Image (spheres, grey):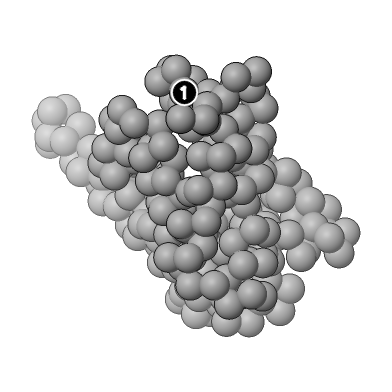
């Protein structure tokens, strides 16, 4: 076999293996997501995920390292809604949102978008918070990570409002970021929708109005 043919064969084999690895990873994450939601994080073992996904426990550990990392992988997929390798900020709906020139419309749109993210990721995020509160070191770190990621997102929103020249007098980007971050939290979503029985539409409308009142100049 010529060197060119050998190289082509190796490239093909590598591509096939990569596709198989991606498919396995996606299957494990989907199974883990379902089990975490149905049975809870603490009651779901890596062995149970492996059995349901048709792989070995060692395969799960090789790919993810820890059960907490597997939960984070499921969380990340839930945030964007699929496992395509496209960052949230580059998604068409997010790009369209950031193109909105009216700051109030932008913030209300962000609240509506956040409502759908919360509905997808909420059950997993609440398990992270509960595990962190119980002292699980892995979930404490994971809670810090997810809160930091949300803070980055809220900072981008606050910066967009600032770029539009619409921040309330005396309010800096960091202050607006912190207000938006709080209003967009899973805790607020859970309090209003699960404990007070608000509909998703009612929640999104209130959060949007609250963000406008908290961050924008009166007008």
Dividing the picture into quadrants, the one containing residue 213 is top right
Pointer 1 local density, CA inside 10 Å: few below 14, some 14–19, many at least 20: some
Dividing the picture into quadrants, the one containing residue 91 is top left
Is the N terminus in the top left, top right, bottom left or bottom right quadrant?
A: top left
Measuring from the top left, give residue 170's x and y in whole percent: 65, 18
Name the residue at 34% across, 31% down: 102
Q: Against 163, is 9 above or below?
A: below
Q: Against 152, is 124 above or below?
A: below
Name the residue at 16% across, 36% down: 8
Measuring from the top left, give residue 120's x and y in whole percent: 47, 64
Question: Which residue is more in the foreground, 105 or 219?
Answer: 219
Dividing the picture into quadrants, the one containing residue 189 is bottom right
- Left or right, residue 18 beside residue 211: left
**Does residue 36 show up?**
no
Question: Which residue is more in the foreground, 71 or 89?
Answer: 89
Q: Label 1, on which residue?
A: 166
**Does residue 101 show up?**
yes
Measuring from the top left, give residue 34's x and y in whole percent: 50, 75
Name the residue at 32% across, 38% down: 97
Question: Which residue is more in the foreground, 125 or 186?
Answer: 186
Q: How many callouts does the rendering have?
A: 1
The outermost residue toward the front is 219
Measuring from the top left, give residue 178's x and y in whole percent: 66, 35
- Mark 1 element type: loop
- Left or right, residue 19 beside residue 55: left
Question: Which residue is more in the foreground, 75 or 31?
Answer: 75
- Left or right, residue 207 beside residue 85: right
- Left or right, residue 32 beside residue 108: right
The outermost residue toward the right is 135
Q: Against 74, is 161 above or below?
A: above
Name the residue at 57% across, 32% down: 215
């Amino acid at each position: 076999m010529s060197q060119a043919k050998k190289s082509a064969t190796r490239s093909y084999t590598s591509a096939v293996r990569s596709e198989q690895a991606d498919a396995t990873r996606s299957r494990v994450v989907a199974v883990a997501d379902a089990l975490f939601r149905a049975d809870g994080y603490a009651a779901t073992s890596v062995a149970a995920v492996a059995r349901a996904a048709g792989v070995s426990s060692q395969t799960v550990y090789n790919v993810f390292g820890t059960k907490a990392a597997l939960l984070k992988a499921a969380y990340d997929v839930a945030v964007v809604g699929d496992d395509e390798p496209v960052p949230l900020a580059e998604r068409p709906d997010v790009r369209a949102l950031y193109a909105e020139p009216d700051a109030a419309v932008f913030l209300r749109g962000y609240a509506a978008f956040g409502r759908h993210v919360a509905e997808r990721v909420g059950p997993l995020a609440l398990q992270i918070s509960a595990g962190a509160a119980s002292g699980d070191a892995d979930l404490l770190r994971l809670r810090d990570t997810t809160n930091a990621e949300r803070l980055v997102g809220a900072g981008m929103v606050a910066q967009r409002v600032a770029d539009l020249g619409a921040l309330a007098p005396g309010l800096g980007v960091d202050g607006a970021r912190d207000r938006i971050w709080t209003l967009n939290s899973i805790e607020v979503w859970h309090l209003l929708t699960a404990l007070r029985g608000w509909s998703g539409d009612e929640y999104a409308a209130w959060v949007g109005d609250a963000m406008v009142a908290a961050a924008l100049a009166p007008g």
